[in-house]
Image (cartoon, helix red, strand yellow):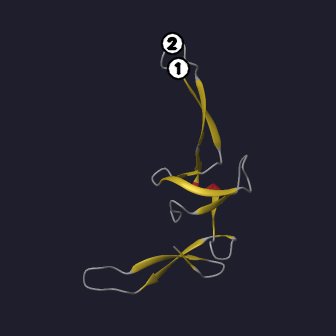
Amino acid sequence: MRIKKGDTVKILTGKDKGKSGKVLNILVLEKRIAVEGLNLKYKHVRPKRSGEKGQRIMFPSLIDSSNVMLVCPKCGKTTRVGVKVASKRTETKRDKRQRECKKCKAIIT
């Protein structure tokens, strides 16, 4: 998966289609992403003591990574992500892989 925590993504399908937000959490093995302020769900919490009231807590739920697309920080468009290999090879280190915008060819950090 070429999306990282802190990236800005745009949602392609679902109830929040067309909205964009910052990535909060990634589950790599399940290929699911949590986006800040989008795909919100309610969680009902019971009162801990007698006399207290229960609560409804809103939290961002996970969304499949195939339903989001990265927004390039340079050109501001949704784009696919390519990998560019910078050959700074030494004896102990491998080549450095960098993410690249497919539209404007800018390096995404």
Helix, strand or loop at disc 1? loop
Residue 77 badge: none
Q: Residues within 10 Å of mark 2 (few under 14, many from 20)?
A: few
Graded by Cα atoms within 10 Å as few (under 14), some (14 to 19) or many (20 or more), the crowding at tag 1 reads: few
Q: In which quarter of the image is residue 96?
A: bottom left
Q: Residue at x 44, y 84 (%)?
A: 86
Please identify the quarter of the rendering in which residue 10 is found.
Answer: bottom right
Q: Position of residue 35 (x, y in %)?
A: 60, 52
At which x and y percent is residue 75?
Answer: 68, 76
Considering depth in this image, is 22 or 104 the residue closer to the camera? 22
Q: Which residue is drawn at 63% across and 61% down?
A: 9
Q: Is there a contact, CB below 8 Å, between mark 1 and mark 2? A: yes
Residue placed most toward the observer, 67 or 45? 45
- Please state which amino acid type lies under the numbered disc 2: Ser
Determine the residue positioned at 53% across, 20% down. Answer: 47
| Location of residue 45 in the rendering, given as x and y in whole percent from the top left corner | 55, 26
User: Is 36 on the left or on the right of 14, as rendered?
Assistant: left
Look at mark 2 in the image and give the residue it sits on. Answer: 50
Q: Where does label 1 land, which residue?
A: 47
